[in-house]
Amino acid sequence: MVDFGREQALLAQGISPVCGIDEAGRGPLVGPVVAACVVLDPHDVPDGLDDSKKLRAAARARLAAEIRQRARVGIGQASATEIDALNIHHATLLAMRRAFEALPGETPVFALVDGRFTPALPCAAEAVVKGDATVRSIAAASIVAKVARDALLEELEAMYPGYGFAQHKGYPTKAHLEALRRLGPCPEHRRSYKPVAACLQADCPSSISAGD
């Protein structure tokens, strides 16, 4: 259950500000991995915060807007090219660090980070397994990151029509894999991911450019 217990324990020790960090987009075959860093106001926490994967799209969009209005938010990303160069693990940590650096206002002195690893930050940090389902600041970050990344995939849909990015958000669905075989990878596909690499090695069409 998502609660504010970890943050409250830190705040009670005079440790403030505390931020939550999470990412969206480790599994998709296309586009960047996006991270968000959120500092909630302890006296104005939006209701309904939860792991973004448990929320319907409309609820995520509503909550993301509320979070941006009522909390401090930073967003960072690592591109498909950086994912291919660094691997998804290190690219995710890079996106998280960029999200922290993009946070406006006072720099947090403690970060609660979803998962088993923390990025290199200029403050203390704790990795929280399944933090997006238990820690409100991380849940807020998961929602903001997911909504921001989904918006980017809708932009890619307009740039590279035919793949269905707006529907599957880059995940390796049957429709996406069929489009990949039919059209070949676009410039935003992650070349290091097996389905894309296999397509490049097979007799797939050449990569297309935006607007082609």
Image: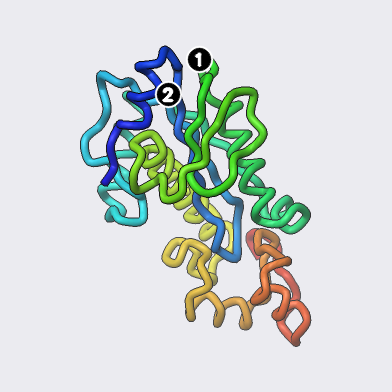
Res 190 visible: yes
Q: Which badge, 1 or 2, comes first in the chain's sequence?
A: 2
Q: Position of residue 192 (x, y in %)?
A: 72, 66
User: Could you tell me how far apart the alpha carbons at marks 1 and 2 are, in whole angstroms?
Assistant: 8 Å
Quarter of the image with the C terminus is bottom right
Q: Which mark is residue 72?
A: 2
Q: Is residue 56 above or below residue 162?
A: above
- Front in this rendered view, residue 50 or 161: 50
Q: Quadrant of residue 6?
A: top left
Res 71 visible: no
- Residue appearing at x 36%, y 39% in the figure: 135
Which residue type carries mark 2?
Answer: Arg
Q: Is residue 104 above or below residue 67?
A: above
Q: Which residue is mark 1?
A: 105
- Residue appearing at x 66%, y 41% in the figure: 94
Q: Position of residue 89 (x, y in %)?
A: 65, 53
Whether pointer 1 and pointer 2 mark residues with C-beta atoms closer than 8 Å, the reply is yes
- Residue appearing at x 51%, y 24% in the figure: 110
Which residue type carries mark 1?
Answer: Gly
Badge 2: few (under 14), some or many (20 or more) residues near its Cα, within 10 Å? some
- Residue appearing at x 33%, y 36% in the figure: 136
- Front in this rendered view, residue 205 or 144: 144
Identify the secondary structure beneath mark 1: loop
Q: Position of residue 103 (x, y in %)?
A: 53, 24
